[in-house]
Amino acid sequence: MRPISIQSSQQETIMRISALVATCAAVVALVSTAAVAQSSNDAVASQPATGMTKASIRLQNRQLSKAVRHALYSTKGLNASNIAVLVKNGTVSLVGTVPDAAQIQVAGDVAKRVPHVAAVDNRVIVEEEGGGQ
């Protein structure tokens, strides 16, 4: 019998789920903070002057998010599996964890090189040993 390996496997699964929950919580906190901090005047000022509809702005945000995610996942030496990408009017926010500190800079640099990215808010941190946060 090998109950220890089953227990270790369960602990590893629990740690991975905890890391995912923590990443999701960070994304929710980032989004809610931005929403609360923005006044109605800021909302009007942040709308492009080109008369774009909300639907077209959301589409552009989704397309840019997809392009940034593709660039991150395509970068050799970067583990982007725990990085969430949020986009608002060309500003890209990266939230999540990477295995080592060097990858934080790489993720930010990759996102900056994607066409139509106006700015990058890099909130990626190094994943704590053991997979938890």
Image: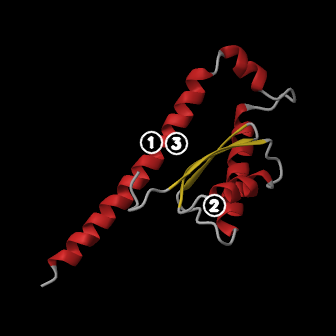
| Label 2 to label 3: alpha-carbon separation | 19 Å
**Mark 3 Cα within 10 Å, few/some/many (few <14, many 20+)?**
many
Tell me the mark number nearer the camera, choosing from 2 and 1: 2
Between residues 75 and 106, which one lies in front from this camera angle? 106
Residue 93 position, x and y percent, is 65, 43
Residue type at the position of mark 2: Gln
| Label 1 to label 3: alpha-carbon separation | 5 Å
Say what secondary structure mark 1 lies in: helix
Task: Look at the image and name its color scheme.
Answer: secondary structure
Asked if labels 3 and 1 touch by Cβ distance under 8 angstroms, the answer is: yes
Say what secondary structure mark 3 lies in: helix
Find residue 10 and report its image quarter: bottom left
Between residues 40 and 23, which one lies in front from this camera angle? 23
Residue type at the position of mark 3: Val
Please name the residue that numbered disc 3 is placed on: 27
Residue type at the position of mark 1: Ala
Q: Residue at x 25, y 71 (%)?
A: 8
Q: Residue at x 32, y 66 (%)?
A: 12
Q: Residue at x 63, y 55 (%)?
A: 104
Which dot marks residue 103?
2
**Mark 1 Cα within 10 Å, few/some/many (few <14, many 20+)?**
few
Please name the residue that numbered disc 1 is placed on: 25
